[in-house]
Structures are given as structure tokens and as C-alpha cells.
Image: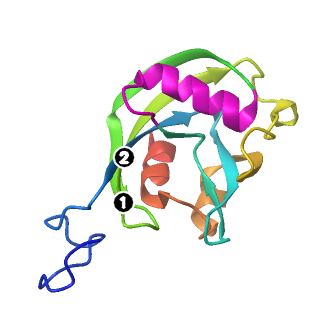
């Protein structure tokens, strides 16, 4: 936890207060025309949100292999291509006050745009997958990383 005696101890607003832990996540940017593939996930606090597929890397895990593992766990599919988007990175703080650095990768899946082909059974927090366009994104508050995802819609 951050130091509550620090004059500006809100880690979300003040990046000078470092989190106790820092995790690296790899996120998949899967496009179908102007839409992005997003997961509907249930967070530990019970909230249901939309987020990009992917997740936390294991210690020492190769980034691309970790992203491929996460895609298989969350969607039950394999990626046909994974390409880094080096300028699409973001930082944040999760519900446990852990720091998160997310790395975005352009991904193509073996299923193409068929979201009915996904198997979420290996990842109980994943409730489903859906294609979302920029208007749906702008109209909903139920997104993790909302600003970062908005940037992906912009190009």
C-alpha cells in the first residue's frame, strides 16, 4: 500500500508514489474491421467489466508466449500472429493497489471473427467475449483501461 502520510498518496493520481508491487501484462488487440474483441470479466470485487484479452505474465515468461498462454486460457484458441505495438503501452493501479504495466500486441486468432468458437472454461473470471465498436465503447462505463482502449479505436 502507498504511504497514507504522503501529502499526495493517491497512486492513481500521483505517479510519484510507487506501488508496492508491479506486474507486467500482455494484452491482445484483436480487430475485426472497426471493432475490437473484448472480454466480459468478473473482478474479485464482483464488478463485471470489459477488457482486452490477455493478462499477467509469469515470472521469467517470454512476453509473446505469455500472451499466447493467456489467449488459450481465456478464449480456448491460438493466435496465428502476434505483433508488438510498441507505442501502445499504459500503466495503472489495480484493485489491490498493485502497479500494472500493459503491453499491447496486434493479434490474429485461428477463429477469425467467430466469437461463438471461444471456450472460456479454463478461466472462470471470463464470462464471455464480444466485438465492440467505438460508439459502444464511448457509451459504456464498464471498461477497464477505458482511455487506453479509446486510443486503440483512434488508430
Q: Determine whether the residue tagged by mark 2 lies in a helix, strand or loop.
A: strand
Residue found farthest to the right:
116
Neighbour tally class for label 2: few under 14, some 14-19, many 20 plus, Cα within 10 Å: some
Tell whether 113 sits left or right of 93.
Answer: right
Neighbour tally class for label 1: few under 14, some 14-19, many 20 plus, Cα within 10 Å: some
Residue found farthest to the top:
80
Q: Determine whether the residue tagged by mark 1 lies in a helix, strand or loop.
A: loop
Residue at position x 65%, y 46% in the image: 38
Residue 59 % position (x, y): 39, 32
Q: Quadrant of the N terminus?
A: bottom left
Q: Nearer the viewer, residue 108 or 12?
A: 12
Does the segment drawn in magenta span residue 121? Answer: no
Residue at position x 58%, y 23% in the image: 68
Q: Do the residues bearing badges 2 and 1 touch, measured as CB atoms within 8 Å?
A: yes
Q: Which residue is mark 1?
A: 98
Question: Does residue 8 lie above or below 51 as drawn?
Answer: below
Residue 138 % position (x, y): 57, 63
Q: Tell me where the magenta segment starts and ends, as one range.
A: 57-76
Q: Quadrant of residue 113?
A: top right
Q: Quadrant of residue 103?
A: top left
Q: Quadrant of the C terminus?
A: top left
Q: Which mark is residue 23?
A: 2
Residue at position x 36%, y 26% in the image: 60
**Which one is earlier in the sequence, the residue at label 2 or at label 1?**
2
Amino acid at each position: 500500500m502507498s504511504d497514507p502520510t504522503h501529502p499526495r498518496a493517491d497512486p492513481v493520481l500521483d505517479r510519484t508514489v510507487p506501488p508496492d508491487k508491479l506486474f507486467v501484462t500482455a494484452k491482445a488487440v484483436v480487430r475485426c474491421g472497426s471493432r475490437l474483441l473484448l472480454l466480459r470479466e468478473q473482478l474479485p470485487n464482483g464488478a463485471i467489466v470489459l477488457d482486452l484479452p490477455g493478462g499477467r505474465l509469469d515470472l521469467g515468461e517470454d512476453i509473446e508466449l505469455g500472451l499466447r498462454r493467456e489467449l488459450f486460457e481465456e478464449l480456448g484458441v491460438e493466435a496465428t500472429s502476434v505483433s508488438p505495438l510498441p507505442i501502445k503501452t499504459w500503466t495503472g493501479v489495480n484493485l489491490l493497489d498493485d502497479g500494472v504495466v500493459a503491453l499491447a500486441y496486434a493479434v490474429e486468432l485461428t477463429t477469425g471473427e467467430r466469437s461463438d468458437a471461444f471456450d472460456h472454461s479454463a478461466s472462470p473470471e471470463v464470462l464471455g467475449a464480444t466485438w465492440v465498436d467505438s460508439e459502444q465503447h464511448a457509451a459504456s462505463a464498464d471498461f477497464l483501461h477505458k482511455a487506453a482502449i479509446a486510443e486503440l479505436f483512434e488508430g
